[in-house]
Amino acid sequence: MRAVIQRVSEASVSINGKIKSQIGPGLLILLGIEEADSSEDAEWLAGKICRLRIMPDSDDVMNLSVDETKGDIIVVSQFTLHAKTKKGNRPSYIHAAAPEIAIPLYNSFVTNLETILNKKVGTGEFGADMKVALINDGPVTILIDTKNKE
């Protein structure tokens, strides 16, 4: 799994001109799932993201987690995070998981976040043409790949 985590002051996801999810301060997570991913990846990644100390404290230092600040989260599926661009100019998505693999893992990831945070997490809609709006706070943008745990 690959996640692009963006600290936001606000974010929303719209489908067909209607807002599906909207948050204030918190995290917007773009999530890419590949065929080799598992429920263990979903659990590890959710825990890692919830514990990341990237939210500002009272001195405006990145010292708190989204859990500690009671921030909100939106998760948007994004298979293009697994684009391969080595050959030619058209990206290949051969390693992106098919919906029958990706949807259950996406749902598992969201459920893990909700369990850790003890609150509802906003989502997009898997496979939909979504419009994502955000105000990146900082800006703070972090990439995590469960296959490369640095």
Image (spheres, helix red, strand yellow):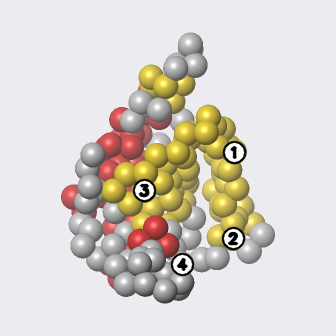
Q: Residue furthest right?
A: 17
Residue 16 horizontal side relative to residue 150, left or right: right
Q: Nearer the viewer, mark 1 or mark 2?
A: 1
Q: Amino acid at mark 2?
A: Ile
Residue at the disc numbered 2: 15
* The disc label shown at residue 135, or none: 1
Residue type at the position of mark 1? Ile
Q: Earlier in the sequence, mark 2 or mark 4?
A: 2
Labels 2 & 4 near each other (Cβ < 8 A): no
Residue 7 placement, left or right of 40? right
User: In what element is the residue under mark 1?
Assistant: strand
Q: Which residue is mark 4?
A: 127
Q: Provide the residue designation for mark 3.
A: 3
Nearer to us in this view, 69 or 78: 78
Measure the C-alpha gap from mark 1 to mark 2.
Answer: 19 Å
- C-alpha gap between disc 2 and disc 3: 21 Å
